[in-house]
Amino acid sequence: MPMVNLKELSFDAVDKFVRDLGWPGYRAQQLREWIYRKRVSDIDAMTNLSKSDRDRLRSKAIVGELELSTRRRSEDGTQKFLFRLSDGQEVEAVLIPDEERHTLCISTQVGCTLDCKFCLTGTMGLIRNLKAHEIVDQVLWTQGQMDANSALTNVVLMGMGEPLANYREVVEALSRLTNPKMVSFSPRRITLSTAGLVPQIRKLGESGLNVNLAVSLNATTNAVRDRVMPAINKRYPIETLLRACRDYPLPPRRRLFFEYVLLKGVNDSETDARRLLQLLKGLRCKVNLIPFNEYPGSPFARPDDETVLRFQAILLKAGFSAFIRKSRGRDILAACGQLRTEATVPA
Ligand code: SAH
């Protein structure tokens, strides 16, 4: 019998594992508490199990952990973690401390299929999807690093990969993260960001997970969106995407987020800002403007601050909430669209 990694088991599978051992049912919840709340990976530390039960468990199971391969700290306090997975592949997560929050940006795939022209991860192609436990482990590992007065407050699925292209594992990970009997992270403090896979947006809306949804719009015409996000926009052009957004069943008092990467001379004009207003009219939403983060060899440039502020002012004047996303961790290539495992960054 191969060893079971308890972290690979769904909620129900932990119940079954415990039943198969002939143990009482409540033991399943004890295991979940050790794994997801106390983040214990040493079975011998599970002190509400008797010595003989621990020995039995140790002969059948382990509690796997992510292995940190490199850690880099930016001048602004942002940290980038590079993790090595059990098959040797690597993914990144970024911890962004702020005055009142600590946000962790996690990855959902090694690489990405989408090939958005402004994104460094896109240049890797897709190597593989992450498993649910590899997604959850990025959160658990980071929680284990934080001290008592700096708990993780927010999780964003905006790292490497397109979360909705790995729908099944991502939804399983979200359900473990939000389950009050597992990680118990508030769904209001989790945001999934998508380039716009329309069928999966609709499915996510019906899933009842109630996490926040961010949509990377990034252009106001199909001509420009086809150029910067060809793989996704050819399948789900702007009108189709926005129809799904209008249909999205938003819980009361919640809003959709739209991300808009500002690329110099490509989508940053006043005409673009006014077209964006028209497109988003009537939608309960917030707009996050992300001035393009450059990386070695990047084919676009970052607009100057004046252009960014002018774009924002047009949205604000029309009554939209529009924020300029501060770039964090640019000096260590940890900002949006700069993630790609170190080993594969061209010299
Ligand atoms: N695939 C998902 C999540 C990962 S990208 C998505 O597309 O939403 C997370 C965000 O970073 C997206 O809004 C994307 O448009 C933005 N982004 C990608 N590359 C960027 C870059 N070089 N500079 C600024 N933002 C970038």
Image (spheres, grey):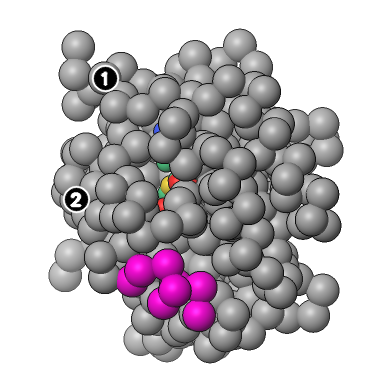
Q: How far from the left and from the top, in percent, is residue 307?
A: 62, 28
Mark 2, Cα crowd under 10 Å, few <14 / some 14-19 / many 20+, is some
Quarter of the image with the C terminus in it? top left
Amino acid beneath label 1? Gly
Find numbered disc 1 in the image and state the secondary structure of the residue it sits on.
loop
Measured as percent of width and height from the top left, residue 333 is found at: 43, 22
Screen quadrant of the N terminus: bottom left
Amino acid beneath label 2: Leu
Write down the quadrant of residue 32 in the picture. bottom right
Residue 199 vertical placement versus 86 (above, below): below
Q: Which residue shows up at 57% across the image and 85% down it?
A: 247
- Residue under circle 2? 126
Tell which tag, 2 or 1, sits nearer the viewer: 1
Residue 43: percent from left, percent from top: 47, 54
Quadrant of ligand 1 in image: top left
Part of the protein shown in magenta: 236-243
Q: Residue at x 57, y 57 (%)?
A: 275
Q: Tell me the crowding category of disc 1: few under 14, some 14 to 19, or many 20 or more residues within 10 angstroms, Cα based.
A: few
